[in-house]
Structures are given as C-alpha cells and as structure tokens.
Amino acid sequence: MKSKGKLVIIGGAVNKGSFTETHFDQNVEKNLNFFERGILRKIINESKLKEDSVIEVITTASQIPDIVGPEYKKAFEFLGTKTCNILDIQNREQANSDAIVARANAADVVMFTGGDQLRLTSILGGTRFHDAILTKYQTEDFIYAGTSAGAAAASENMIYQGSSSEALLKGEIKTTQGLGFIENVIIDTHFVQRGRIGRLFQAVVNNPRTLGIGLGEDTGLFIQDDEMTAIGSGLVIIVDGLQIKDTNLTNVDLGQPISIKNLIVDVLSMNDTFDMKSREMTIVNSQYNPIPQVIPSNYTSD
C-alpha cells in the first residue's frame, strides 16, 4: 500500500548527544543554527492545514531537549505556525501513555530533532506512539520530518555507528532497524562535512537493493510517493547498488578493505529529483536541456 503521507529528511546542522561522535561542539546554546528556515517553510507549506497545522517537536534523541525544543518552537512560530508543541518523550512508559498517543493522533506534523538515533529507536520503537504516527503517515495527509538523528531513523534500516575514516573496512558500519517510514533506503546525515560517503558505500554493497541517501548540512529531501526532491542549499548524494558487477565483500576478513565495481553515484542540488521506482535522477537546471530557438519574424527558409 502506497503511503498518503510525506517525508522531510534533513542532514542536520549541529548534532548533539550522539555517542558515535568523538567530540561535541562547545557553547551548544550559541551554535543552534536554524539553517532549516527555508526547509521549515517547506514543511509548513506542505502540511495539511499550513500555518494552522498542529506541529509536535519530538526531542527524544537530544541530550539538550530543554534547549533544542524551544528553539524549534520559536522558529516555527516565527514562520507563522499557530500551534507548535514540544513533546519530550524520555521513556517507553510515556510513549505508551494515552496522553502521548492522543497528541500524536491530533498532530499534522511531527518534527524529530537531532541527537542519537539509537536512543530514538530504542525508546520509541514499537510503542503506541510509534504505531500512531506510522498509521497516520500511511493513511492520512501527515508529515514526518526529521533532522540528523530524526532523519537517519526514518528508514526501515539505519546506520547508528561507524568510523568515517575506516568506513570501507569490512564490519566497520553498524546498522539496526529504524522507525520504518520508508523502505529499501538507508540514510546518513552530516554527510559531506564529515566525509561519510564510505559508510553509505558499505551499507549499499551489503545489500544492493538498498538505496543509499547522504544528506549534507543545510540540505534535505522532500519525499512523496516515489519521488524525492532536493531542498536546502547543499548536496544530496544518492548511492545506487543495483548495477554492482563485482565485490570482494565475502572473501575478505573483518577489518579488510572492500572493493566494489560499478557503483552508481548521483549528486543532487536544490530542486533536482530522483525517482525511486525507475532509479532515475533529473537535473532541473541541466546544461544539456534544449534551449528554445527564437526565429526572427522576417526569417524565410530557402
């Protein structure tokens, strides 16, 4: 069954609270750069009731929910949203409560902040709250939006750990089940800035049916039906493994380099699209698009 909802997945700006990172930025409060202003506007415009939509900001992934939540609320309200709430679910008991489920059922948009995606899935996975928003996404005009950890957790399978510098060594990438809003893709965030392309290469060669999506900072994808559209100012990297011809994956030991032949990589910028069914990318500002010829009114052919 084709889902009636929409996804907005965002690469992140500053990611806090993730044990997979080796250090944290200093002065966190001063570094919350709401780069997503254009993307947040996209979320509002695509939501069911526009500025009248009910938005719930989910801060579960973050270790600084009391800082991140109010900043998102302030940003959405600055853009004209009338009802933006903060939902800081900190344990599975809360996520199974009647009050939390009622808020999920009343929401038109859920916005998942950054942080630790494993924390997100371990607290919310399989709860009544998770079931409620998944059902709304499948059956209603509903938006799941997520930045950083919130984006990584949106897919059926997700990367939760793995060194960028050693990503193409067998076994370096750790994956687990995500929240399941989109199938047959795996999403990585802070992609360009943290040199994570090797993580996607390994995730895709492990199962070439999987489409790898790398989101740069200040960048996202708007996904509806089978079409993905790049939004924001940066780059989206798509790694397609269907045409892989050869690899040494099963013949090398753990920790050894992986070879891959004929991996396809597409790079999308703002407004470019990718059809997940045909696996075809369209560049909207292509230099090869035919330029209409202007024929002078007094022109006559021989």
Image: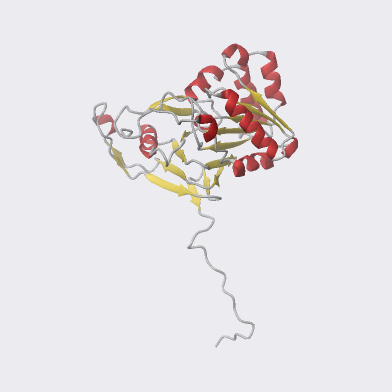
Q: Of residues 240 and 87, which is closer to you in this image?
A: 87
In the drawing, does residue 46 fall left or right of residue 158? right
Q: How many marks?
A: 0
Quarter the C terminus occupies: bottom right
Q: Of residues 188 and 251, which is closer to you in this image?
A: 188
Q: Of residues 155 and 49, which is closer to you in this image?
A: 49
In the drawing, does residue 123 fall left or right of residue 192? right
- Dividing the picture into quarters, in which one does residue 144 lie? top right
Give the percent coordinates (x, y) of residue 259. 28, 38
Quarter the N terminus occupies: top right
- Dividing the picture into quarters, in which one does residue 84 lie? top right
Residue shown at the point (71%, 19%) measured from the top left: 102
Give the percent coordinates (x, y) of residue 103. 70, 22
Placement of 297 over or under 46, stated as above or below: below
- Dividing the picture into quarters, in which one does residue 33 lie? top right
Residue 302 visible in the current orientation: yes
Give the percent coordinates (x, y) of residue 296. 61, 81
Give the percent coordinates (x, y) of residue 154. 53, 30
